[in-house]
Amino acid sequence: MPASARLLATAVAAAACLGATAVPATATTDTDPVVSRGVTIPTFYNPPATLPAADGALVRSEPLPLALSLPGVGGPLPGTATRLMYRSTDSNGRPVAVTGAYIEPAAAWKGGGARPLAAVAPGTMGQGDQCAASLGLEHPLRLNGQTVSVGYENLAIYRLLAKGIAVVVTDYAGLGATDRLHTYVNRVDEAHAVLDAVRAARSVRGASVTADSRVALFGYSQGGGATAAAAELQATYAPDVTLAGTYSGAPPADLTDVTEAIDGSDLAGALGWSVNGFLQSDPALRPIAEAHLNDAGRAALADLSTMCVGDALFAYNSVRSTGWTTDGRPISDIIAAEPALRAFLDDQRVGRLRPSGPVRLATGTSDNLVPHGQARQLAVDWCRKGADVTYKAVALPDVGRPLINHFAPLLTDQGEAVSWLTDRLAGKPATSTCPALLSKS
């Protein structure tokens, strides 16, 4: 697969981008081994036939060895990890098994009150089960000649742990768990997975967090969309999870804009993940897709369904969807012409509900992969609904590569984002920037 040295050098950066989904997976039993691009997925990730009745209930757990860990006087540093499988509910109202991880920090919490919890929603990892963020904690870099998987979310996770904040990270529906496809950027699936991860963390054996612990959400790119959606749905889906603060970085709030932006970009493969996810969420859309996809398009979707971000960067960098369709139109034009597709993407729009608790929304002014304009509009929409929003425009120069324009603000702003969340978890009030933002809108 052709790939430039520059892309190899930015494989970790690449991963912070937007997410997607996959093509149908084969059903498995608890003991069937699943192999994805040469990686044997632990049987832990095979969901059982029957799930618990309650959302957030643990299905199973086991110790998770952290690859980046040091011995300490009071235990391993930065903490002790537990692999999780828990029940959630998908956008069709059906039970779904979701995997993830909980990390009990070695550091003491110095902010007062019970130890708080941060739920981390990963940025785009890919569509193959080997790409799951919980596996990235155990294998931060996987290069086997068939896949390139990078656990880039570990940086944010470890920064939170260093402050004495317990962390739970979700893999989302269908990523890691081997029974279905990852429904990437499905706002309901992702929001539910994030909120149910909080519930699951409270019942982990040995966890110091309780129902009294303050809760924060952290996510960038796909993760930013997930935390934004979770903050919107918390009041109705998880009233038992009170949010002290939510960080939503570069959220893909308007998938119509994002779909057009990623086509032909460094991360064009995410367009295939998105289509795969749409079809997983709503099989009624499949005849429409079949009518418009040519053989190359169908082959690309199947190929991408088992790829991680690094794989897609190498194989589908700058590919345009015009080569995937029967009439040479880009997928964004086909979506615009098909009422059912338009309605599906419109239903994924984040910004129609008021989020719970204070929210910090950050976006790079030069981000043209997950476009800055639609992310800023989300902040405006929330402010108009009376939300407590701290908006941060991360001003960086346009370097000519959409992937870097999207990734650079994550690194530039991450420390400030963690500090903002830490203050919310310590009970300090946020300062809304809505008056200034609305005065310019």
Image (cartoon, rainbow, N blue to C red):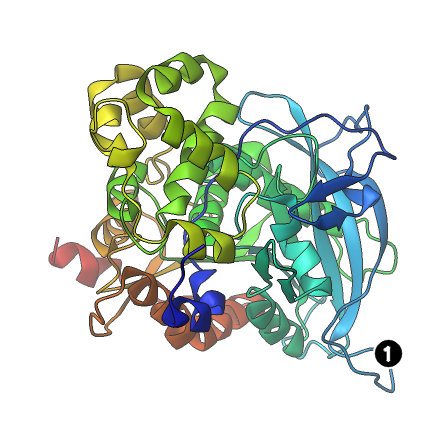
Q: Residues within 10 Å of mark 1 (few under 14, many from 20)?
A: few
List x then y, in percent, for residue 69. Answer: 76, 77
Q: Quadrant of residue 172?
A: top right
Quadrant including the N terminus: bottom left
Q: Is residue 278 left or right of residue 362?
A: right
- Above or below: residue 246 compared with residue 398: above
List x then y, in percent, for residue 92. Answer: 55, 21
The count of marks equals 1
Seen from the viewer's position, the closer of residues 90 and 258 is 258
Q: Residue at x 35, y 69 (%)?
A: 409
Q: Residue furthest left?
A: 440
- Please give the residue where the numbered disc 1 appears in the rendered image: 75
- Above or below: residue 299 compared with residue 403: above
Seen from the viewer's position, the closer of residues 280 and 318 is 318
Q: Residue at x 22, y 65 (%)?
A: 365
- Above or below: residue 163 compared with residue 347: below
Q: Does any portion of residue 374 appear in the rendered image?
A: yes
Seen from the viewer's position, the closer of residues 29 and 227 is 29
Q: Residue at x 81, y 39 (%)?
A: 33
Q: Residue at x 70, y 33 (%)?
A: 55
- Above or below: residue 131 compared with residue 27: below
Q: Quadrant of residue 17?
A: bottom left
Q: Does any portion of residue 428 appear in the rendered image?
A: no
Q: Residue furthest bottom?
A: 73
List x then y, in percent, for residue 326. Answer: 27, 22
Judged from the image, the secondary structure of the residue bearing numbered disc 1 is loop
Amino acid on which disc 1 is placed:
Gly
List x then y, in percent, for residue 50. Answer: 81, 24
